[in-house]
């Protein structure tokens, strides 16, 4: 029997339309807009001025504080302005706008496609490289990777977990990366293992990607300590805590981190980025993005420079079909609808999905019928119906004791609710209020 | 048979007497003195428990009034001056009167002025919509239009205008309790000084974006040009974060800023219609006799 997490979970239709589309380079846009805050933590401080010419890979915003990440130019060209520009959230954020001229990279970057598999750097140097290259978790949460690689005192990492689950329907970027760059990913995993000083790594992959499992199994057979584990297809298998529970049967305590149970989880995309940063000296300025949808003419997986407008990406996939009603940034379960396609692709953009009208319409919300399906679906063992009511009535103290902050916002509860209640919308609001309350209490 | 009835009556009466004595002793011993004036004050308070005074309810406010040495900082916006004078009379203190206020909605983003650019199909409340995204228009500051303020109003002083999609505040019914101000996740509603004949001049916009994007999102947005600041002779207008704000305590209703504003973001309400320059003196008299 395949491994999986024991409670909750749902089975949305997979719709991995673009799974057999090889990764292609997206043609450069004429202009990129690079937000200086693309990660969890403090926004970075701009290092360039208006009118300055930059090369691809050049630092344009430096990390400010420990939990922050460097931002690099993704193209060569001229900085035309540094301004407040609408990003995918709809709000205006400070962005660096660069007009593209040619495609000149920094000389220090090794543009050769050949694999460099021997590791010359020490663990500390690898962490430093990740910090310099501005690497963040590419699974979507964009947490700065160097922070995750620095184990706090008194804690010990026993096993590294690599997340190749990609449980979100539609998305295929990690899947394609595993098929096309297995050697690079494995070198990346070895680098991460060295940085964390562990001798065991486990790659978790959902069983709907047999080709990726086969290819990585074959490559890993020649590697000491790295093993591949097929997992049952169940959403949210790719949740950090769910993956840990499935692979090593340990439970991350409420409010705790994976390191509390002796493990660190990194995405396969991050492993690949670490490989490029350490072995090729290439900062994180491009990533694989899936562009998909049922009526889009040319769905696919593209290697996209950070800051490329989403509209440019959609153009490459055949433009917006007439029937499109919603453009979602991220997966269909956790992604957010965009107000406009004129927003940049950022480090956390794993996919862009175009939904037709009938797919995108939310059911009309009715009263709770007490069927408790949301409780059955919740992979964190919470009571979504109760959390929603508490958030609705502003009973945030009670919501805190009901562990609203443990919610990872996977959306399974809203997905299964037969009454179409917007459970997650309210829980997310309640969670933000509780977090605010907790921060204020801490400040006192 | 008789003896049963006698025993029953006697035992029950003696039990009754015993409990009466216990209750009497307890009531004496643990008696809590409560100022009778608290009840008196509570009697005259509106009893809506709206929280406009800053206390949890009318009873709390009555207690605070009785306890306080002076009425400084204590005010029931619902009852206003007449109520505070009555309360002062009961307590034998001096009434401190505060300016009456009124709530205004600082957004004029009707569908005509502010075109809709996306469709929202989530929970129909402002708090949730605000926590999720910027709204159905390009303005990330303006009214979302799901009426959290109307739900919060306990005085039936607000309703949503179906045509404009904006809340409307009734001048007669609004008591300036501030419930709508708290309910609005975007702090669009403001309490301003209530003027004669309910006249109002205010910047009906809260957009802090620069001029270009603000104007693009909404035709009547404040673009932060500062013309009104220059036009004002009474130093009542300040410009901060690309947004002008008129201090209702300093404003003398000269209406110069209204004509200056290039985007008509400043509104004048309940004024008689403007007349030609030649008949200016007539206008002032018309205003007085109205």
Image (cartoon, rainbow, N blue to C red):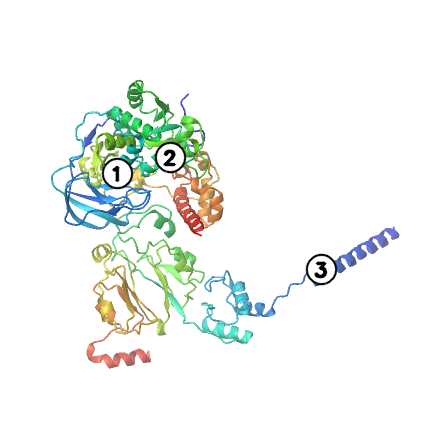
Residue A341 visible, this angle: no
Q: Specify whether A220 is left or right of A392.
A: left
From the top left corner, tell me how far across and down residue A420 is, in percent. Answer: 40, 41
First in residue order: circle 2 vs circle 1: 1
Say which of marks 1 and 3 sits in front. Answer: 1
Q: CA distance from mark 2 to mark 3?
A: 65 Å
Helix, strand, or loop for circle 1? helix
Residue annotated with mark 2: A151
Query: Which residue occupies the foreground of this view, A80 or B251?
Result: A80
- Name which quarter of the figure residue B242 lies in: bottom left
Chain hosting mark 3: B
Helix, strand, or loop for circle 3? helix
From the top left corner, tell me how far across and down residue A393 is, in percent. Answer: 46, 50
Q: Which mark is residue A132?
A: 1
Chain hosting mark 1: A
Residue annotated with mark 3: B26
Query: Which residue occupies the foreground of this view, A278 or B136?
Result: A278
Quadrant in which the C terminus of chain B is drawn: bottom left
Callout 1–callout 3 Cβ contact below 8 Å: no
From the top left corner, tell me how far across and down residue A56 is, in percent. Answer: 17, 39
Helix, strand, or loop for circle 2? loop
Task: Give a yes or no on whether discs 1 and 3 share a subunit.
Answer: no
Query: Which residue occupies the foreground of this view, B86 or B174?
Result: B86
Say which of marks 2 and 3 sits in front. Answer: 2
The 10 Å Cα crowd at callout 3, few under 14, some 14 to 19, many 20 or more, is few
The 10 Å Cα crowd at callout 2, few under 14, some 14 to 19, many 20 or more, is some
The number of numbered discs placed on residues in the rendered structure image is 3
**Residue at 51 percent of width and 68 percent of height:** B45
Q: CA distance from mark 2 to mark 1?
A: 18 Å
Query: Which residue occupies the foreground of this view, A150 or A375?
Result: A150
């Amino acid at each position: 029997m395949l491994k999986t997490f024991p409670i909750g979970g749902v089975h949305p239709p997979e719709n991995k339309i673009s799974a057999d589309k090889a990764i292609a380079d997206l043609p450069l846009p004429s202009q990129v807009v690079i937000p200086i805050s693309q990660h969890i933590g403090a926004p970075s401080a701009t290092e360039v001025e208006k009118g300055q010419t930059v090369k691809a890979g050049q630092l344009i915003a430096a990390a400010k504080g420990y939990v922050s990440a460097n931002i690099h130019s993704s193209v060569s060209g001229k900085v035309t302005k540094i301004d407040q520009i609408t990003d995918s959230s709809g709000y205006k954020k400070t962005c660096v706008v660069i007009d593209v001229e040619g495609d000149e990279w920094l000389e220090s970057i090794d543009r050769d496609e050949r694999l460099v598999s021997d590791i010359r750097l020490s663990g500390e140097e690898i962490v430093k490289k990740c910090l310099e290259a501005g690497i963040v978790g590419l699974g979507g949460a964009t947490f700065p990777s160097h922070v995750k690689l620095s184990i706090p005192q008194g804690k010990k990492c026993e096993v590294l977990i690599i997340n190749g689950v990609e449980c979100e329907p539609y998305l295929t970027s990690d899947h394609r990366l595993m098929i096309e760059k297995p050697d690079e990913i494995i070198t990346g995993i070895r680098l991460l293992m060295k940085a964390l000083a562990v001798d065991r790594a486990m790659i978790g992959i959902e069983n709907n990607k047999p080709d990726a499992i086969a290819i990585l199994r074959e490559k890993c057979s020649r590697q000491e300590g790295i093993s591949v584990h097929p997992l049952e297809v169940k959403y949210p298998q790719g949740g950090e805590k769910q993956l840990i529970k499935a692979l090593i049967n340990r439970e991350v305590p409420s409010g705790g981190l994976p390191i509390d149970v002796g493990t660190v989880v990194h995405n396969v995309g991050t492993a690949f980025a670490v490989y490029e940063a350490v072995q090729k000296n290439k900062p994180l300025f491009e990533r694989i993005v899936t562009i998909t949808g049922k009526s889009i003419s040319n769905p696919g997986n593209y290697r996209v420079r950070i800051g490329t407008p989403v509209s440019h990406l959609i153009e490459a996939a055949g433009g917006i079909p007439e029937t499109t009603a919603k453009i979602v940034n991220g997966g269909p379960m956790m992604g957010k609808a965009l107000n406009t396609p004129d927003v940049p692709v950022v480090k956390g953009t794993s996919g862009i999905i175009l939904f037709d009208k009938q797919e995108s319409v939310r059911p009309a919300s009715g009263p709770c019928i007490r069927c408790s399906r949301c409780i059955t679906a919740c992979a964190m063992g919470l009571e979504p119906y109760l959390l929603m009511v508490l958030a609705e009535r502003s009973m945030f103290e009670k919501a805190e004791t009901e562990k609203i902050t443990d919610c990872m916002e996977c959306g399974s509860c809203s997905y299964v609710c037969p009454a179409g209640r917007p459970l997650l919308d309210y829980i997310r609001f309640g969670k933000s209020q509780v977090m605010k309350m907790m921060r204020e209490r801490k400040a006192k | 048979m008789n003896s049963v009835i006698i025993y029953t009556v006697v035992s029950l009466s003696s039990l009754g007497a015993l409990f009466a004595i216990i209750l009497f002793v307890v009531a004496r011993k643990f008696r809590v003195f409560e100022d009778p004036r608290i009840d008196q004050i509570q009697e005259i308070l509106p009893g809506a428990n709206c929280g406009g005074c800053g206390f949890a309810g009318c009873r709390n406010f009555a207690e605070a009034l009785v306890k306080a040495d002076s009425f400084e900082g204590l005010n029931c916006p619902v009852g206003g001056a007449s109520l505070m004078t009555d309360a002062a009379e009961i307590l034998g203190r001096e009434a401190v009167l505060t300016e009456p206020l009124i709530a205004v909605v600082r957004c004029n983003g009707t569908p005509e002025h502010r075109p809709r650019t996306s469709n929202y199909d989530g929970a129909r409340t402002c708090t949730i919509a605000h926590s999720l995204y910027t709204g159905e228009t390009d303005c990330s500051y303006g009214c979302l239009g799901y009426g959290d303020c109307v739900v919060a109003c306990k005085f039936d002083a607000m309703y949503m205008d179906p045509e404009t999609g904006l809340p409307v505040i009734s001048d007669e019914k609004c008591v300036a309790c501030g419930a709508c101000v708290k309910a609005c996740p975007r702090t669009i509603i403001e309490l301003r000084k209530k003027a004669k004949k309910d006249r109002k001049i205010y910047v009906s916009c809260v957009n802090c974006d620069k001029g270009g994007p603000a104007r693009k999102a909404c035709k009547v947005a404040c673009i932060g040009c500062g013309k009104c600041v220059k036009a004002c002779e009474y130093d009542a207008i300040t410009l901060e974060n690309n947004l002008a704000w008129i201090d209702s305590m300093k404003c003398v209703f000269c209406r110069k800023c209204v004509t200056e504003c290039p985007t008509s973001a400043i509104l004048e309400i309940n004024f008689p219609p403007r007349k030609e320059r030649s008949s200016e003196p007539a206008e002032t008299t018309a205003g007085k006799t109205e």
